[in-house]
Amino acid sequence: WEMINYALNHGIDRYNFYGVSGKFTEDAEDAGVVKFKKGYNAEIIEYVGDFIKPINKPVYAAYTALKKVKDRIF
C-alpha cells in the first residue's frame, strides 16, 4: 500500500510488483496471481528481465556460495 501511495504522490503511473513468471497460460503455476492482478484492471507488461550486476565481486561470490550452502541445508 505504501508503494502505491508513493507512486501516486510522485506522479509515477506504473510500478512493478513482480509476482508473475511470464508464463501466461491457464495452467501456469501463477495463473491465479495473473487473474487476481487483472481483476484490479492491471496491465501485465512483459519486459526483457532482471539482471544482477555485482558491484563487489568477491562479496557477491561469497554471498552466492553461502546461499547455495543454506539452500542445501534448509
Image (cartoon, grey):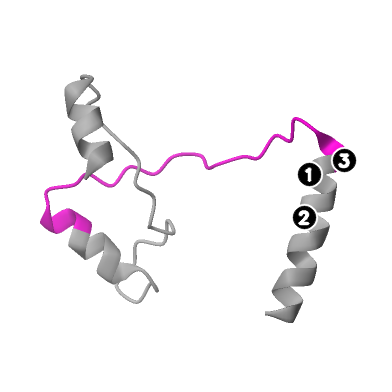
Q: What residue range appears in magenta?
A: 37-58
The answer to which quarter of the image holds residue 29 is: bottom left
Q: Which residue is mark 3?
A: 58
Position of 7 with respect to 22 (left or right) is left
Is residue 52 found inside the magenta-colored segment of the image? yes
Which labelled disc corresponds to residue 32? none
Secondary structure mainly formed by the magenta segment: loop
State the quadrant of the C terminus.
bottom right
Q: Could you tell me how far apart the alpha carbons at marks 2 and 3 are, in whole angstroms?
A: 10 Å
* Residue 58 position (above or below residue 24): above
Verify CB contact (< 8 Å) between mark 2 and mark 3: no
> How would you rate the neighbour count of disc 1 (Cα within 10 Å): few for under 14, some for 14-19, many for 20 or more?
few
Verify CB contact (< 8 Å) between mark 1 and mark 2: yes
Q: Position of residue 25 (x, y in %)?
A: 34, 67
Position of 29 with respect to 38 (left or right) is right
Residue closest to the far bottom: 73
Which labelled disc corresponds to residue 64? 2
The answer to which quarter of the image holds residue 3 is: top left
Q: Which residue is mark 1?
A: 60
Verify CB contact (< 8 Å) between mark 3 and mark 1: yes
> How would you rate the neighbour count of disc 3 (Cα within 10 Å): few for under 14, some for 14-19, many for 20 or more?
few
* Residue 17 position (above or below residue 13): below
Residue closest to the far top: 11
> How would you rate the neighbour count of disc 2 (Cα within 10 Å): few for under 14, some for 14-19, many for 20 or more?
few
* Residue 67 position (above or below residue 4): below
Q: Could you tell me how far apart the alpha carbons at marks 1 and 2 are, in whole angstroms?
A: 6 Å
Q: Residue at x 35, y 61 (%)?
A: 24
> Amino acid under label 1?
Tyr
Q: Residue at x 83, y 37 (%)?
A: 57
* SS for dot 1: helix
> Amino acid under label 3?
Pro
* SS for dot 2: helix
